[in-house]
Image: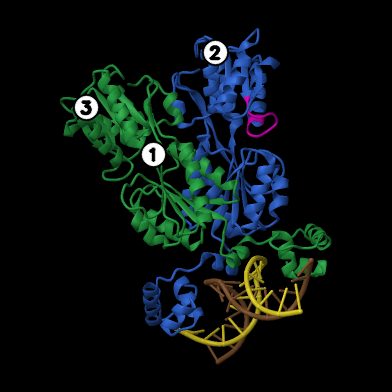
Chain colours: A blue, B green, C brown, D yellow
Amino acid sequence: MADVAAAAGVSPTTVSHALSGKRAVSEATRARILQVVDDLGYRPNAVAQSLRSQKTKTVGFLVVDISNPYYPAVARAVHDGLAAAGYVSLIGITYGEADAEETVLRDMVARKVDGLIMQPMSLSASRIRQIVGPNMPVVLISDDQGQLFADQVETDDARGIAEAVRYLHEKGIDDVGFVSGPDGRTPGATRLTAFRAAADALGVRVLDDWIEHAPFTRDGGFAAGSRLLASGSRPRAIVCANDVLAVGVIDAARLAGLRVPDDVAIVGFDDIETADLISPRLTTVVNPAAMVGLTCAEALLRRFDAGPDEAYRRQSLSTHLVARESA
Amino acid sequence: MADVAAAAGVSPTTVSHALSGKRAVSEATRARILQVVDDLGYRPNAVAQSLRSQKTKTVGFLVVDISNPYYPAVARAVHDGLAAAGYVSLIGITYGEADAEETVLRDMVARKVDGLIMQPMSLSASRIRQIVGPNMPVVLISDDQGQLFADQVETDDARGIAEAVRYLHEKGIDDVGFVSGPDGRTPGATRLTAFRAAADALGVRVLDDWIEHAPFTRDGGFAAGSRLLASGSRPRAIVCANDVLAVGVIDAARLAGLRVPDDVAIVGFDDIETADLISPRLTTVVNPAAMVGLTCAEALLRRFDAGPDEAYRRQSLSTHLVARESA
DNA sequence: TTGAAAGCGCTAACAG
DNA sequence: CTGTTAGCGCTTTCAA
């Protein structure tokens, strides 16, 4: 920058302002500076800009598992929403582990990201706030109903789950099992709770043996489905905490010689693109991934404007059942 | 850091070295410093570290379209390979557009990423080298056979395509069409060329009307497939430049009342997870996404060690056909 | 084993 | 409309 200033016969300050537009610069000098910038191939150093201005134009985006098709859909919307405002995403993958979540979070803070978007799997919101400090803009994808420690975007999973249980009930199916995610962790736990409540309300029978926990993978679903379907009195339907699990459960049903949906009806959650492509086409609860991502990006951008003192907001997006072939 | 130094009764230099381990520090002072760091909750500022050390421990990863399931698989392997070495990925989505590729690339350079991984869609390797400068470590996912301007990881797409054509030929199918990506762009163009060569070699007939170009989306595949199948003398099989296109082509065949594979056989490329889930299960060429990602990460790490002067390397990963139901 | 001094490249505050 | 000065928070010589 000093070279540019010298060649243009002005001070570095003026070069800075000519480039940033933060201060008026006469048309003549600006043109001269731009010319020199071009001749010399000068490119501002964003690291130095960040150090001085205390802004990195970078957002940390922590994703649980990018292999799960739900996340790329969210990530795309987050990226696009942020890119439009000139922000770039630093990506971290946590696989839902507490250690990884904390380590990645600390690294992002050290890197001075301007804000964070994450779906907490193992860490509580208050712990996250503690790690990142009081002033870091954070948007949590979470349905935690307690005190807010950050802006929060949630999906009304209970509603979609209730719709699914009612749908089965109205088909005369009153013995239903549930394959959840890792025990005690969001979002599986929330969906399981919602499932139990909905079943109770309708008098749908749920034996303890019909509740399984598994990692959110196809293999996890296969293992859980196999256990569940092997139990003496198997249920007539299985609701799954996500579509990837449901695919595994369908594998298990097929291997057990059971027809879907005639012998066991299967319902998923998320409505990933694959849901409409597999056979039987998956009946599932639509989780509006792109909306979630976009809403997060907008919430973060709003927080940048509002500053840290404005009260945290909670936004809820609704889910709904889409009936296809598997149930 | 100054505060820590003062509280520990040492110079900032010593604090820096106690934390980085780049210089020996007596056990006693190190312990004292670590204690103070803990008490004060001091966290090093990575931006300042980067400015001074000229290293950001950040890698730019440009992805064409994260909605296409092939990319998350690559991204995951890239991320994991890099994370193990302490690098974080800055992600950019280009949608294959030249402007976006150039803009994002420039931004990454301005942000002083230590290296770049990208699959060029619109920009040539030499243009990329020109944009990022002579010393930036870059790994290109590309099968460009010309002069190398960066380390390159390629998949031997021609081999998989040839296998596919031979497979069809051996089934007695000698009228074959091809649905490629955007005209003239990698990787569609490469795969089309390989297809033509393989067809020629075996005497498989390929009418001009049987070659279609479309964006790499399901909708693109649907449109291209519809046009192709509407032509007077339609082919007995269609090879697609990727699986997402193939899914769209299957949609088109279904809508046209054609059975797959009996009326039209369909072959994809990539072997995304969905390929094995859809009905009919997709016969496709396996593109080793995780291997590609891991190989890129390793190539970049090696380049970091080797420096800019060592000759660029080209690594090739092989592809192969997996026969399922659609052909 | 430690410290002093310099400076990475930029922008903000102040001054004119 | 423009310049001077200071300093963001670190690490790297150089010196002891």
Q: Chain of mark 1?
A: B
Residue behind mark 3: B202
Q: Secondary structure at mark 2?
A: loop
Residue sticking out furthest to the top: A232
Dot 1 amino acid type: Thr
Q: Chain of mark 2?
A: A
| Viewer can see residue A312 | no
Q: Please tell me whether the stretch drawn in magenta is mainly helix, strand or loop.
A: loop
Q: Quadrant of the C terminus of chain B?
A: top left
> Are the numbered discs 3 and 2 placed on the same chain, yes or no?
no
Q: Position of residue B117 (x, y in %)?
A: 46, 50
Q: Secondary structure at mark 3?
A: helix
* Residues at circles 1 and 2 in contact by the CB criterion of under 8 Å: no
Q: Position of residue A321 (x, y in %)?
A: 51, 26
Dot label at residue A264: 2
Q: Nearer the viewer, mark 1 or mark 2?
A: 1
Dot label at residue B204: none
**What residue lies at 68% left-to-right and 15% top-to-bottom?**
A209
Q: Nearer the viewer, residue A210 or A176?
A: A210
**What residue lies at 47% left-to-right and 71% top-to-bottom?**
A20
Q: Is residue A268 above or below residue B290?
A: above
Q: Nearer the viewer, residue A12 or A156?
A: A12
Real-space CA distance between mark 3 and mark 2, rounded to the nearest whole angstrom: 48 Å
Q: Quadrant of the N terminus of chain B?
A: bottom right
Dot label at residue B155: 1
Which segment is the magenta one? Answer: A180-189
> Are the numbered discs 3 and 1 placed on the same chain, yes or no?
yes
Badge 2 crowding class, 10 Å Cα cut-off, few under 14, some 14 to 19, many 20 or more, is: many
Give the image quarter of residue B218. top left
Query: Is-magenta flag for residue B275?
Result: no
